Image (cartoon, rainbow, N blue to C red):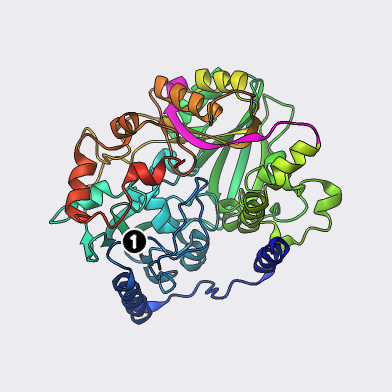
Amino acid sequence: MASSGLIDILLDVVRPAHDRRRGRLVGAHAHRAGVDRLLASYRAIPTDATVRLAKKTSNLFRARAGTSAPGLDVSGLTGVVSVDPVARTADVQGMCTFEELVDATLPFGLAPLVVPQLKTITLGGAVTGLGIESTSFRNGLPHESVLEIDVLTGDGEILTARPDGENADLFWGFPNSYGTLGYSVRLRIQLERVEPYVALRHVRFTSLEDLQSTMDRIVTDKEYDGERVDYLDGVVFTADECYLTLGRQTSEPGPVSDYTGRDIYYRSLQHESVNHPKTDRLTIRDYLWRWDTDWFWCSRAFGAQNPKVRRFWPKKLLRSSFYWKLIAIDHRYDVADRLEACKGNPPRERVVQDVEVPLERTADFVHWFLREIPIEPLWLCPLRLREPAPAGASAQRPWPLYPLEPKRTYVNVGFWSSVPITPGASEGAANRLIEDTVAGFDGHKSLYSDAYYSREDFERLYYGGDRYSELKNRYDPESRLLDLFSKAVQRR
């Protein structure tokens, strides 16, 4: 039985995706048909069952509760409905991946304002959850580019929410609700013009404090050493080897690097000189997906960065969607813990998190992390809420369920690995320590992975005072959807 399940997973890994519409638009008629299937599937769910997506894949690392009840059929909501190159907007179905979205917009010389790092992240997921990337220091987060959104609410209605009007509270409260207020069906988003290439400078620092102050200046000036900066992120290998990568869009032709095969992108950042940045060039598409090939650096856990292994690793399987399949195998058969046991080692605690700390506290937080948590490298990505905020926004807290302060710069710190479990330690000890420390740094934690907050602490941090309860009562009055605490905090 176990071997049969393993074979099924491996076969699913190598099967081609069944509905790849590279650059094609699905159109209004197909969208309407997809909506009809969605509504029919909602009506088929028993009234005493929790409404959920009928979706086998996910970019969430926290455990999902199992159920035998049918789910929402979103199979017809996976594409781009239309692109308006004049208005620079796109109408996009909620389950459309960013890979499909980018393939539809790049032929127009356009891209979403923020493209999260992994190809299989969906637009709806990045809006109801959170997404971030190297444009976030100037473009904010994905939900800030949304002009309007159709939402299937918990009571089975599809409502259109805009920044002002009848459902404005749903528009502002939807980000970071993680499907507990409803599921996005269609989103109209802003796009921006992009050039065919991105010129890169990898600037090395031997001090986290120097990196922090330089990042601060770039966020403010949008330039470095007299050259425009369109993209900005960083990698910390150690406290005295860390980098900022500065990207500039360009139409100038010339040779480009390829990190979709033998060469590994994050290793290309490293060099010895602190006075002369290392330069590189990528096509715009390869730049947007530079982290997907090796899942940042996490592919090393599967041996994919071993030169002898990589030589024979099929190029089409160097992508995050394949590594997710390997994670599924590990979860089903406890592969990693069994291997650790064979070596006489204790099991390991998964520490897969993204947190945001104020920019001025970044160096202090990273120093703490490197001392206390044995994980490296770390990813850094600065972000600010967009200015000016859309009409109708609250000046104090425009997005109440994830209260970043306007006009304040934060830095996302990403770390994705595991640590040995200390005998006798409480469950999730490392994650609990990180949660407490982030709160002490006036920071926030994304909710896509394991969380250990008490209900009282969670509601204080993520419920926006009474806002979430008010939204839940209005748009899911019968509690057909899980509440945010139940969905986000690890259930034991």
Judge left or right: residue 289 versus residue 126. Answer: right
- Does 355 appear above or below 53? above
113 and 187: which is toward the camera: 187
Vertical arrangement, residue 163 with respect to residue 466, above or below: below
Classify residue 468 by image quadrant. top left
- The x, y position of residue 203, in whole percent, is 62, 31
In the picture of the structure, the residue carrying the numbered disc 1 is 51
Residue 32 place in picture, x, y as percent = 32, 78
Please give the name of the residue rendered at 29% of the width and 72% of the height, measured from the top-left corner.
43
Residue 393 appears anywhere in the view: no
Q: Which residues are magenta?
A: 343-361
Q: Quadrant of residue 111?
A: bottom left
Which residue sits furthest right? 308
Q: Is residue 278 above or below residue 80?
A: above
User: What amino acid is at disc 1?
Assistant: Val
Q: Is residue 62 magenta?
A: no
Identity of the residue drawn at 79% across and 32% down: 344
Classify residue 269 by image quadrant.
top right
Whole-percent x, y for residue 243 in the image: 62, 31
**Drawn side of residue 427 relative to residue 136, left or right:** right
- SS at circle 1: loop
Looking at the image, which residue is at 52% across and 20% down?
363
